[in-house]
Amino acid sequence: RMIQQGGLLEYIQTPLDLDEIGGMSNLKKWLNHRKDVFSPEAKAFGIVPPKDVLMLGVQGAGKSLCAKAIATAWQQPLLRLDPSTLYASYIGESEKNLREALRQTEMMAPVILWIDEIEKAFASAASRSADGGLSQRMFGTLLTWLQEHQMPVFVVATANDIEALPPELLRKGRFDEIFFVDLPTQEVRREIFAIHLRKRGRDPVRFDLDALARASQDYSGSEIEQAVIAALHNAYAEKTDLGTETILAALQGSPPLSATMAEKVSALRQWAQGRCVIAE
């Protein structure tokens, strides 16, 4: 009820098991090593629980899945904060909304807070903007809270555009870890096809997963899911069962977004080298 009243936070349903998420082997390992660090035993051992991670990556590559993976691995509820909902037309109202969202989050702790596409809300903080310094004030409020909050709230911030992020957000030590989520490899694409086929009552063994993985090069995980869904609709309309050829046709009919963003994807990969942990 508290979330519904404010409209600032959204409760997100998470998968029951990490096996429902394809790839992300390094992220999963990182999560498994830290799943018990919030216990009294870990504290007595001298461990300080992690507070936050930043997920950078290609659009649609699975950053939202990473946020769900963390909530699933640690068996904690997941709240999504869309920064665009914070901004209001009245002076002082936007800052008030941010403080209220953070207060509500702390009241629900322990919890995972997912700040989605963080660069869209605070991009103006990286430059001299025409918003009267609002973005900078909002960004300052968030940075202070990230550094000083004491309640067990773990923050997952996701971003697509590193150029729009204020430099302070990317400095060493600001986040416990920065993960780079790239487009899935052929092996991971095979795994993703199997997951989505099983979710729709199909036995993956009946499909040529290798052919599907090869045909979906440069496709994101969400684009692979949409291809399976489109193929399912086509098969139903044609009164036939879903098969490899139907999915291959759906892939051919919908080229990947990365094909039109090749330069941007290449620049993002280059920036991530040596700065980020690869999620896969």
Image (spheres, rainbow, N blue to C red):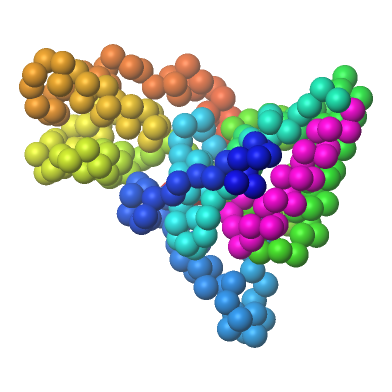
Question: Which residue shows up at 57% across the image and 77% down it?
Answer: 39
Picture layout, residue 232 above or below residue 172 = above
Residue occupying image coordinates x 71% and y 64%: 151
The structure residue drawn at horizontal position 47% and vertical position 16%, both measured from the top left corner, is 260
Q: Position of residue 40 (x, y in %)?
A: 61, 81
Residue bounds of the magenta highlight: 91-114
Report whether residue 177 is seen.
no
| Closest to the observer, 47 or 88 | 88
> In screen coordinates, is 191 left or right of 111?
left
The count of marks equals 0
- Residue 13: x and y in percent read 45, 46
- Residue 83 shows in this picture: yes
Q: Is residue 35 magenta?
A: no
The secondary structure making up most of the magenta span is: helix
Q: Is residue 27 left or right of residue 147?
A: left
Q: Nearer the viewer, residue 209 or 121?
A: 121
Residue at 15% x, 39% y is: 202
Q: Is residue 106 magenta?
A: yes
Estimate the x, y position of residue 133 in percent, counting from the top left.
90, 29
- Res 138 quadrant in image: top right
Residue 46 sits above or below residue 145 on the image: below
Where residue 82 appears, as percent x and y from the top left, is 64, 35
